Image (cartoon, grey):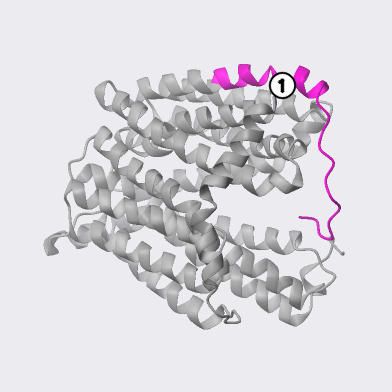
Amino acid sequence: MKTDYSFKELPFSARKHVRIYQFQQFLSQVSLGIGIVIFILLLQQRGFNLYDISLIMAAFSASTLLFELPLGGLADGIGRKPVYIASLIAAIMSLTILLIFHSFIAAICAYAILGLSRALRSGTLDAWFVEKFRDVAPGFGTLPALAKIQFGSAVGLAMGAIFGGFLADTLGVMLLPFGFGPYDAPLIFSIGLTALIIVYTLIFIQETSHAINVTTIKSGFSNVPFIIKDSLFYATKHQIISILLVSTALFSLAFFTLETFWVPFVKPMLVGGYAVSIIGIISAIHFGSMAVGAAVSAFFVTLFSGSNIKTLIFWVVLTGLSLLALAFTQNVYYFVPIFILLNIALGAQGAPEDSIFHDYVPDDKRSTLLSLESVVIQLGGLIGMLSLGYIAELYDISTAWILSGIIITLIGLIYCLLPKRMANTPTVAHEKVDDEG
């Protein structure tokens, strides 16, 4: 299996396949980036306080948590493309409700449907791409092709963030006489772009149609109790996986306050008519900083003599301390460099954590434990939205961030339990596979 190759070495059909999917993912991430910049500001502009926003975000997380596991077999049962199209239709419904109706209940419904959209989308076209790539490029590994697609996605996310802010500051003002708010312009554009993505997907994403597999669809729902029971049984008994999952839940709980509240925290620091545009640029820097962190991750593992756990402890503690420092910033010129450092730390900790996790997970339980990890992340985020969101409204965002920073720093101390445990626990032998994964 050839894993080190240039794009030109691929067969023409494989290069075409990569370009089609790369552009599709680019458009999808542009739409996502637009929403990231304006969603919280939109909710604030409509009069919702920080705890209201926390409850609205909780509806998204709860919906994703409720549907992600049951819908796992749907794409295998009716095809990846139809399920992905359904997720886009759900996204348009959500954005349209948010645009037309301004009540709290409407916002809850919109975000619940958005959570359903995310659950439907999970693992659909990614699986389609890998399967078709192996058909049109036998003998070539998927890693370089996926890296090319992920680069396009990252560029799309950054461009969407910048474009969303620019739309709010320019076109948003022009729409005010028509009864729209300044943040409705990016929302309208995102709806139109999502409709364009549906058309593009229908035309260019080709999937061999197959008969509906009712058994597979039913198993997606009936297997949920087994998945949770089986993965919980293994995780609670394993002295390393149990620590990782508890820490993941706590991290997700604490991390919610950063992702949700950094935009309303920094906006009062900005003056002038292009505040949202600047937020869009900061968002692009946010995504780029995480990419830098991922890029330097391997170097730091080498720096710590090949120890994934020591590297992970370093980055997690740095994340917690950076969030604590961020809570005390009152000027955008101090906020941005600390925010960059924080996001580099976030990006760098993913690889060593994943490596430790997979070293102690047997192949026959990998899917169930990854499903459990997904549930833990959503559940932790849901609890964080309801608890720390309330604290942010009752006191202020800085107080919520201080608590979050303390929690994340404590996670680093919890990880200090792992080196001794890892020394006494053998890693799991994995089956040899044909591809690089």
State whether residue 205 is above or below residue 304: below
Dividing the picture into quarters, in which one does residue 304 lie?
Answer: top right
Q: Which residues are magenta?
A: 409-437
Helix, strand or loop at label 1? It is: helix
Disc 1: which residue: 418
Q: Position of residue 384 (x, y in %)?
A: 40, 31
Q: Residue at x 43, y 33 (%)?
A: 258
Magenta stretch holds residue 419? yes
Q: Position of residue 346 (x, y in %)?
A: 58, 35
Q: Position of residue 137 (x, y in %)?
A: 78, 74
Quadrant in which the N terminus is drawn: bottom right
Q: Residue at x 49, y 61 (%)?
A: 121
Q: Nearer the viewer, residue 428 or 305?
A: 428
Quadrant in which the C terminus is drawn: bottom right
Q: Amino acid at mark 1?
A: Leu
Magenta stretch holds residue 287? no
